[in-house]
Image (cartoon, rainbow, N blue to C red):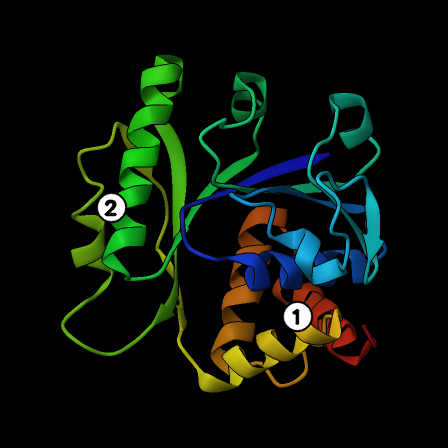
Amino acid sequence: MENWLFTGKSDKRDLLLYICKVLSGSGNRVLLVDMTDGKKYRYLIGEMKASLPITEFCGFDICDNVSIAEAGHYDYCLYDLETLQFGSRELWEGADAVLWVTSYDRYEVESSAEWFAHLFLRWPQLKDLEIKPVFIRTFDGFLNADYIMGFVEHLPVYWSGQAVQIPWSETNAIVQMENEHAQSLRMRGISRAYKKALMSLIVDLAGWSGSLTKKALRMAERKRA
């Protein structure tokens, strides 16, 4: 079982949902755990109760709370983690990958830095954590990845690898909004740059070959939500 923690105050639901669809489309059992402020995923799947039990959605499962035993039934567990509860220390220590997903929005960047500072105050043992940066909704301008990383360079972490960047696209935003209102998960129509970033992340995280990942992505595109 692989545990991947996706941190940061930016809305990253579309990214995690697409990754889950690609992974599950290749026959893997995938669980997405909603640890966002306000439990955002329940709106997507039409479950408006205070808690979200394990629920099937477009070929994989989503919930807002899971035990270690339950998580053990899955090949991949992805956590969208932004609450100040942080999960458990065991979750962090057992994570196979930790990612920081953020836009260039200053509030989202600086609030993420504060969030990590609180995390290390709570569990100093997590210092020197290895984290991969992922920048979403980027654009051409004087703002760039190096500039944004300056806001978090004081944190006691090791920033691993080259940052993944997903440029902003009106088409991507349209697909995401239409999916949310249709309570579906269509991938056809997202930009080529987004697909390239998805493949790069899955190759890096899951250790899949480029050809296998490309095939899985095409299957996910063809599969009806």
Please state the horizontal and vertical placement of residue 130, each as a whole percent of the image: 39, 33
Residue that carries the numbered disc 1 in the rendered image: 180
Does residue 191 appear in this view?
Answer: no
Label 1 neighbourhood size at 10 Å, few (<14), some (14-19), many (20+)? some
* In this rendering, position of residue 46 left or right of residue 165: right
Residue that carries the numbered disc 2 in the rendered image: 110
Residue 52, above or below 176: above
Does residue 205 appear in this view?
Answer: yes
- Mark seen at residue 117: none
Residue 171, above or below 92: below
* In this rendering, position of residue 113 left or right of residue 55: left
Front position in the image: 7 or 51 = 51
For label 2, the SS is helix
Whichever of labels 1 and 2 marks the residue nearer the N terminus, that label is 2
Please state the horizontal and vertical placement of residue 129, each as a whole percent of the image: 38, 28
Q: Residue at x 66, y 70 (%)?
A: 180
Q: Nearer the viewer, mark 1 or mark 2?
A: 1
Residue type for callout 1? Glu
Q: Residue at x 60, y 80 (%)?
A: 175
* In this rendering, position of residue 115 left or right of residue 155: right
Front position in the image: 176 or 19 = 176
Please state the horizontal and vertical placement of residue 103, each as a whole percent of the image: 35, 61
Dividing the picture into quadrants, the one containing residue 21 is bottom right
The C terminus: image quadrant: bottom right
Please state the horizontal and vertical placement of residue 55, each as a whole percent of the image: 83, 48
For label 1, the SS is helix
